[in-house]
Image (cartoon, helix red, strand yellow):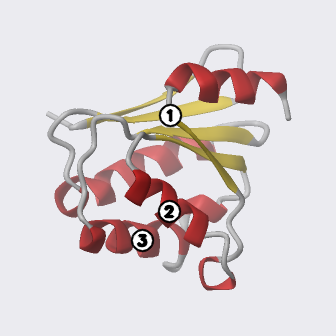
Amino acid sequence: MANFTVEKLSGEPIVLFTALEGYRISADLPASIEAAVAMIDRQPQPVYYIQNLVQMAADMNEIAQAANMLARNESPLYHHPNIGLVIVVTGDPTIKMAFQGMHSQMYGNLESKSFDTLDAALEFARSGR
């Protein structure tokens, strides 16, 4: 069983990824990227890609591995043409700091937002800002 879900919210330009309890970057990230790309490829317009990472635990090595896979590989998910904005939901200050670091040229100047709660992230996306 997968330790994540990827869903398109009905009637909204939002794709929601949720890392479930037990999600491990080293084991689950490749499959979760594949599932997210498949979902985002099918969208007729750019979407907000919200990653709910509230239940995910990761160390600095795992976070660096994820950042490279998501923003710097051959076809980086975070730079998918159908993603209007990457939004992360986490209370983990290390993950928030990693996303801030992805605003650098090394990661393609990724524009992203972070929120402590899924409700706040959804409110932001629904406001169209």
Q: Which of 39 and 77 is in front in this view?
A: 77
Mark 2 to mark 1: distance in Å? 13 Å
| Mark 2: amino acid | Met
Residue 126 higher or lower than 15, as above or below: above
| Mark 1: amino acid | Asp
Q: Name the residue under label 2.
A: 97
Q: Where is residue 66 in the image (x, y as percent from the top left)?
A: 37, 66
Q: Where is residue 15 in the image (x, y as percent from the top left)?
A: 58, 33
Specify the farthest residue to the top: 10
Q: Nearer the viewer, residue 96 or 129?
A: 96
Q: How many other residues sit within 10 Å of disc 3, few (<14), some (14-19) or many (≥20)?
A: some
Q: Is mark 1 on a helix, strand or loop?
A: loop
Q: How many other residues sit within 10 Å of disc 2, few (<14), some (14-19) or many (≥20)?
A: few
Q: Nearer the viewer, residue 70 or 30?
A: 70
- Snapshot quadrant of residue 67: bottom left
Image quadrant in which the N terminus is located: top left
Q: Position of residue 104 (x, y in %)?
A: 66, 78
- Give the side of residue 39 with respect to residue 68, left or right: right
Q: Mark 3 points at which residue?
A: 69
